[in-house]
Amino acid sequence: MINIYSYDELRKSKHRLSLLLFLLLNIALSIFYVLNALNNSASATLPSLIVALFCGSAIIACNFQLKSYAHEMNFFALCIGMLWAWHIDIRFHSTAVNDSDFLLYSLMVIFFISAISLTDNFIAFCLHSLPSALTVIVLDDFAHILTLLFTIALPLVSFSLHNLMQKRSEAFTSELVRRLSEEREKFSDLSMIDPLTGLYNRRGLHNRLNNLPGDRPVRHYILLLDIDHFKAYNDNYGHTMGDSALVAVAAAIRDTVRSRDIVVRYGGEEFLVMLIDVDESIAIACAEAVRQAVLDLKIPHKFNDKVSTNVTLSAGIAVMADNDIEASLRAADTALYLAKNRGRNSIEIAGYKTEQQMKLSAKT
Ligand SMILES: Nc1nc2c(ncn2[C@@H]2O[C@H](COP(=O)(O)OP(=O)(O)OP(=O)(O)O)[C@@H](O)[C@H]2O)c(=O)[nH]1
């Protein structure tokens, strides 16, 4: 579902890809320099080898850890930029003749990499290209200072303008997505169905409560179900995956209980099931079956490791006495809190006090 979170994720994945492209291009350049050195029976420079090693390690780290390093782009750009400046200095001094063609060509290659992969990050663009640019000016003894300054200033000015326009367009799109999501929330509140999971929303629950048959005294139970460590899931797997997990968990809950039971998406990652006309043992068995069904989905959740390596949920169970949904919800919430404190992936029934209170109220 498109919302401000999925838009942010799209931007993050764009930054991740830019970082990957940046690292790959730098590896390609260092390989080119190594091959070039071999062709000329010279040895490759230390900085160009470090660049290959540094970029290779960064790619491996990005792949093997879910953590995104895209926000470290400036750091990567500065380190690699300094290494290329060092490389230019070594190669320039290793040739006997004053090779200004080499200087210009090296500078162009660095600008080319920056232009291809750092278009949406002006600071990283400068950090990557300026060390080489300054080195070239100094090595050239300021001989072609005007030409070089022009060569450096032209892309910098174009990119700062391009960057400005891109930031404005991103801010506009982000605001547009936010407003559209707000509008959709408004409409979803007016309807009775949660648009993501297809379950009832709170409005749907109240509608069903108002239409419960009241021809004979029956006992209902409330299950309050909450996914464990779901913030960590979102933070590490992304909001879009979080939404998919919510959809799968919602379907598992719906499929586990009977069709006459009312299943509600009660909050973000919180579900409510109203078990119609059951006794305590069936309510406990249902809660346990739901807990197991969610575990059996085997949705990987590495960051739930104290509990399981898959997505789990905890449940609070409470009887609904005197059709008082609010009191029952409070009791189920307290039980849920206990289930979370007991270590999660567990179910807890609200204290026997509630049961006894029920019996007392039944006698009177
Ligand atoms: N993907 C997604 N995440 C949601 C949605 N609604 C709420 N959430 C997230 O659910 C998370 C709930 O986190 P918390 O209330 O801190 O609880 P928790 O991390 O599950 O921890 P415990 O409940 O104590 O196990 C927040 O990160 C919300 O952003 C939604 O519609 N989609």
Image (spheres, rainbow, N blue to C red):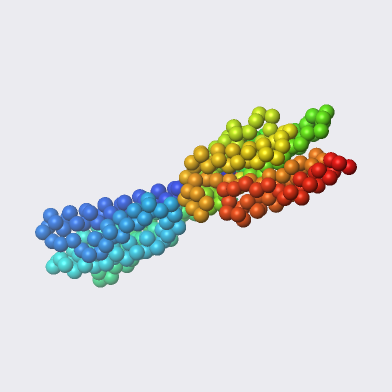
Residue pictured at 32% horizontal, 57% vertical: 57
List x then y, in percent, for residue 345.
57, 48
Please state the total of marks drawn on the protein image.
0
Which residue lies most toward the left here?
41
Res. 307 in view: yes
Residue name at image x 89 percent, y 42 percent: 364
> Which image quarter: residue 279?
top right
> Quick check: 298 left or right of 63?
right
Query: Residue 352, percent across and down?
Result: 74, 49
Residue 274, horizontal then vertical, whole percent? 70, 37
- Residue at image position (27%, 67%) is 86
Q: Quadrant of the N terminus?
A: top right
Vertical side of 314 occupied by 261: above or below: above
Task: Pick whichever, 340 or 131, lies toward us.
Answer: 340
* 114 relative position to 286: left or right: left
Residue 154 higher or lower than 145, as above or below: above
Q: Nearer the viewer, residue 301 or 3?
A: 301
**Is 235 positioned to the left or the right of 201 in the image?**
left
Residue sitting nearer the eye, 185 or 91: 185
Identify the residue at image location x=31%, y=60%.
54
Residue extending furthest right? 364
One can see residue 171 in this view: no
Relative to 137, residue 57 above or below: above
Front-most of residues 63 and 165: 63
Residue 28 relative to residue 238: left or right: left
